[in-house]
Image (spheres, rainbow, N blue to C red):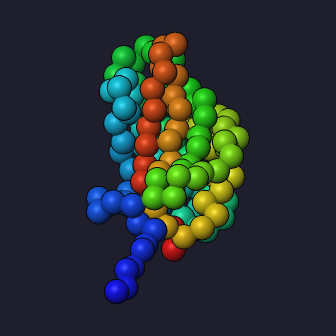
Amino acid sequence: MFSVVGCVGDATAADDLTGDGMKDVRSTHGLVRADVGLKGNDVVRGKNDFVLAFSPEDPRAKTRLISAEAIMPAHGHGTTPAKVDRDGDVWVARDVNLFMAGRWEVTFGVEVADQSDAVRVTIDVQ
């Protein structure tokens, strides 16, 4: 008897962040929409920089990126939290280390008008 084990996790499609496009993502609690993309063209195995532009449901709400972490749900391990900072009109999560091939879930912690929320993308690393 043989069995095959992979690093995919689930059958849902990964978010496509390749090229210069941005993915429109609604936050977990619906407080904000975020355009999420990469600084650079493609997801790479190793360090990646993510760019986020926020559109809160309440346009008067102050919105900021407070954290960025990545996990591999199929393996139960992740990375150290990334550095986050503002760069003009966008926020950047720097050096998100996707250190092995497989499916990653990247969670961006967001604060909207003093309320916590999260934006998540799922990506496949080759």
Is 110 rendered above or below residue 41? above
Q: Position of residue 47 (x, y in %)?
A: 67, 60
Residue found farthest to the front: 1
Q: Position of residue 29 (x, y in %)?
A: 35, 26
The quadrant holding residue 101 is: bottom right
Residue at 41%, 66% in the rendered image: 8
Residue found farthest to the bottom: 1
Q: Along the horizontal axis of the image, is 66 left or right of 126?
A: right
Residue at 50%, 48% in the rendered image: 106
**What number of labels is visible?**
0
Q: Position of residue 70 (x, y in %)?
A: 56, 49
- The reply to whether residue 97 is in sight is yes
Identify which residue, 93 or 91, lies in the foreground: 93
Is 92 rendered above or below residue 7? above
Identify which residue, 107 or 57, lies in the foreground: 107
Residue found farthest to the left: 12
The quadrant holding residue 45 is: bottom right
Q: Quadrant of the N terminus?
A: bottom left
Residue at 38%, 57% in the rendered image: 15
Residue at 66%, 42% in the rendered image: 81
Q: Along the horizontal axis of the image, is 111 left or right of 82?
A: left
